[in-house]
């Protein structure tokens, strides 16, 4: 088995997935007599693939093509096993192969069924989720080449085009940052970016919005803790009455770094991701609405990227101290990249990951700030590697 397992897209339809499972199991079970069982519309007793080699108790498999973000439920397993019990001659091994992800409850259900079947002399069940199927693709590269090889060149070509397009959208920003870094070899990073809070306003609909209601309290708190200057990520005059409520000494410490053009560019970069995961960006990118529920932390990953990417870029552009966990952001980007099937979304996520990896934390002299409002205000102080 190769040291690194290549990532593959799960097949888009049931027929392709069944064909992939058939080719893999023929090699893995060393059973050239494996065949697809019956045809669509016929009663199959829960069996898609069966060994026709003449064994008294044959081996069989069922293929379930789910979303990779979903988990196979215990009920799905119980239903499949009950159907497989009707197959004649009785099976000695039954494998469930799926593009879905693992779940502890499903594994416990299989353990319980296997214990019962051992006592009753019935067949053993094996669950193989997509991560394990990918290991088989790495173990049997000829199957990978047969199934994916014909379309792989086209997919790579499409991804290259998408990545090239995505890079172009960031090119002007890269040039600007590079110029600023060249002009200022060691920025002072003496301004703190005041980030808004994100609130979930409709639990059932999954609507998030940027909440600026605590902005004044945050400004006062940070100044009291020693912050010299505070950067706000909107344009001066955008909220006309907001700063009038601050005492004049505090108002003098506030600078405006909002960049509507950059915010629009970030929205363009994220739009293929929103489209694939059925998300609507509203109010100029200040709110996000999920039109369907996703498992496996997808909401959290998308919200994190939505709230953090713009702040990251505006912080780099203006040499700000920013409260961002780059490792957590990178993890969210990688996870979405793994689950995404949209070439444009995958390409843009790859570019975002490249941007994050291009920068590294820089240690500078700054005041250590701790507060109940912002539990960890870090000098995320990022400099471009040139």
Image (cartoon, helix red, strand yellow):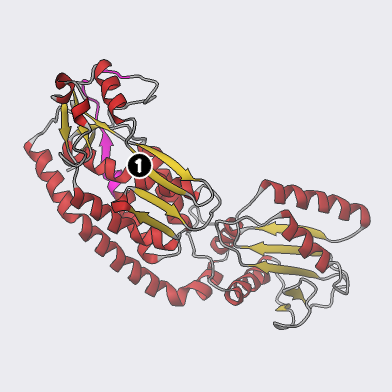
Choose between 160 and 298: the one closer to the eye: 298
Give coordinates of residue 48: x percent, y percent: 72, 74
Choose between 353 and 195: the one closer to the eye: 195
Q: Is residue 360 magenta?
A: yes
Answer with left or right where residue 146 lies relative to residue 61: left
Which residue extends farthest right? 120
Q: Residue at x 49, y 63 (%)?
A: 8
Give coordinates of residue 304: x percent, y percent: 40, 44
Give coordinates of residue 244: x percent, y percent: 18, 28
Residue 259 vertical position relative to residue 240 in the rendered view, above or below: below
Q: Is residue 203 magenta?
A: no
Choose between 53 and 339: the one closer to the eye: 339
Choose between 285 and 298: the one closer to the eye: 285
Residue 325: which quarter of the image? top left
If the image is split into quadrants, where does the C terminus sit?
top left
Say whether residue 384 is visible: no
If the image is split into quadrants, where does the N terminus sit?
bottom right
Q: Residue at x 65, y 49 (%)?
A: 103
Residue 54: which quarter of the image? bottom right
Residue 185 vertical position relative to residue 330 in the rendered view, above or below: above
Q: Secondary structure at mark 1?
A: strand
Residue 29 vertical position relative to residue 329 in the rendered view, above or below: below
Which residue extends farthest left? 183
* Segment tinted magenta in the rendering: 355-369
The residue indicated by pointer 1 is 210
Give coordinates of residue 10: x percent, y percent: 53, 65
Answer with left or right where residue 372 lies relative to residue 379: right
């Amino acid at each position: 088995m190769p040291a690194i397992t290549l990532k593959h897209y799960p097949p888009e339809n049931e027929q392709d997935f069944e064909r992939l499972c058939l080719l893999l199991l023929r090699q893995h079970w060393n059973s050239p007599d494996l065949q697809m069982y019956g045809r669509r519309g016929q009663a199959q007793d829960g069996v898609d693939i069966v060994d026709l080699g003449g064994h008294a108790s044959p081996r069989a498999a069922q293929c379930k093509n789910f979303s990779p973000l979903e988990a196979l439920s215990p009920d799905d397993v119980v239903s499949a096993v009950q159907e497989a019990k009707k197959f004649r001659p009785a099976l000695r091994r039954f494998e469930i192969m799926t593009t879905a992800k693992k779940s502890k409850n499903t594994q416990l259900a299989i353990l319980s069924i296997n214990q019962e079947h051992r006592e009753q002399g019935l067949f053993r069940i094996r669950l193989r989720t997509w991560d394990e199927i990918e290991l088989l693709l790495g173990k049997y590269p000829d199957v990978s080449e047969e199934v994916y090889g014909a379309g792989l060149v086209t997919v790579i070509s499409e991804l290259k085009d998408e990545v090239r397009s995505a890079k172009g959208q960031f090119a002007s920003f890269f040039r600007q940052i590079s110029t600023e870094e060249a002009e200022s070899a060691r920025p002072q990073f003496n301004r703190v970016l005041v980030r808004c809070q994100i609130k979930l306003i409709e639990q059932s609909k999954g609507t998030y919005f940027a909440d600026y209601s605590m902005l004044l309290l945050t400004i006062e708190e940070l100044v009291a803790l020693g912050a010299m200057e505070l950067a706000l990520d909107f344009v001066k005059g955008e909220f006309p009455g907001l700063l009038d409520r601050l005492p004049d000494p505090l108002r003098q410490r506030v600078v405006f770094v909002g960049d509507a053009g950059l915010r629009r560019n970030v929205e363009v970069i994220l739009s293929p991701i929103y489209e694939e995961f059925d998300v609507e960006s509203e109010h100029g990118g200040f709110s996000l609405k999920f039109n369907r529920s996703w498992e496996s932390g997808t909401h959290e990953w998308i919200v994190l990227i939505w709230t953090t990417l713009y702040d990251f870029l505006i912080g780099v552009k203006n040499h700000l101290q920013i409260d961002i966990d780059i490792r957590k952001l990178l993890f969210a980007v990688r996870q979405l990249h793994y689950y995404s099937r949209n070439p444009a979304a995958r390409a843009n996520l790859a570019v975002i990951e490249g941007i994050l990896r291009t920068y590294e934390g820089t240690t500078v002299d700054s005041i250590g700030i701790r507060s109940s409002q912002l539990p960890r205000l870090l000098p995320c102080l990022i400099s471009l590697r040139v």
